[in-house]
Image (tube, rainbow, N blue to C red):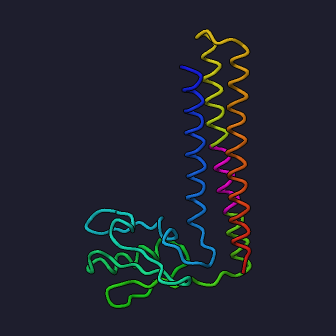
Amino acid sequence: MQPNEIIAMATADMKKAVEYTLNQFNSLHTGKASPAMLDSVKVEAYGAVSTLKEVAAVSTPDARSIVVQPWDKSILKDVEKAIIDANLGFNPLIDGGILRVPIPELTGERRTELAKQAGSMAEDGRVRVRQARRDSLDLIKSSKEDGLSEDDIKRLEKDIQKEHDTYIANINEELSKKEADLRKV
């Protein structure tokens, strides 16, 4: 495998790890309504399990509520049950052909709990970035037989470490922002 291919693969894997972590952060609610808060909801309807986005439109008319409008009104009860079963702490209310999901005010205890959860999500992301680095370094070591010199190997390892450090710093920066957002009343 060529050195630039190894670096490109490592960068892509690290970028995916950061994107996954940021996506996880979006599932934590900070007291402000966001359609991403319901991304983990799975609805059982028509004999199959689907994501909420596949069966309904999700919007936020204001900062304190989410509105879910199923494409088919006959699955309204299924959508309500799915939101309750997702155990996100929301209590949806049926209002005609839509569901209103009021966002409860966060307590200090809940804010601390969510900050800890964000920290564990960030650590998971950092582990994924480290794994991408480890895989790349293993590929470099196996490429030694392909005629790479010691200097080339050291340079590649240094480049991959630099990428690793950049992505870890990115996760730490986003974690700081999320924790500040969670602690803000």
Residue 120 covered by magenta stretch: yes
Residue depicted at x 38% and y 67%: 53
Could you say which is closer to the camera, residue 4 or residue 139?
4
Q: Report the side of 115 relative to 21 (left or right).
A: right
Q: Report the side of 142 relative to 93 (left or right).
A: right
- Dominant SS in magenta: helix
Residue depicted at x 44% and y 85%: 100
Q: Report the side of 79 relative to 143 (left or right).
A: left
Q: Report the side of 170 relative to 58 (left or right).
A: right
Outermost bottom residue? 96
Residue 152 placement (x, y as % from top left): 69, 17
Give the position of the C terminus as an image quadrant: bottom right
Instruction: Note whether 118 is above or below 165 in the view shown.
Output: below
Could you say which is closer to the camera, residue 185 or residue 116?
185
* Residue 24 picture quarter: bottom right
Residue 49 placement (x, y as % from top left): 34, 62
Residue 96 placement (x, y as % from top left): 33, 90
Instruction: Note whether 89 is above or below 135 in the view shown.
Output: below
Residue 61 placement (x, y as % from top left): 47, 83
* Residue 138 picture quarter: top right
Q: Which residues are magenta?
A: 118-128
Residue depicted at x 63% and y 21%: 140
Residue depicted at x 69% and y 30%: 159
Residue 179 covered by magenta stretch: no
- What is the total number of numbered labels drawn onto the structure image? 0
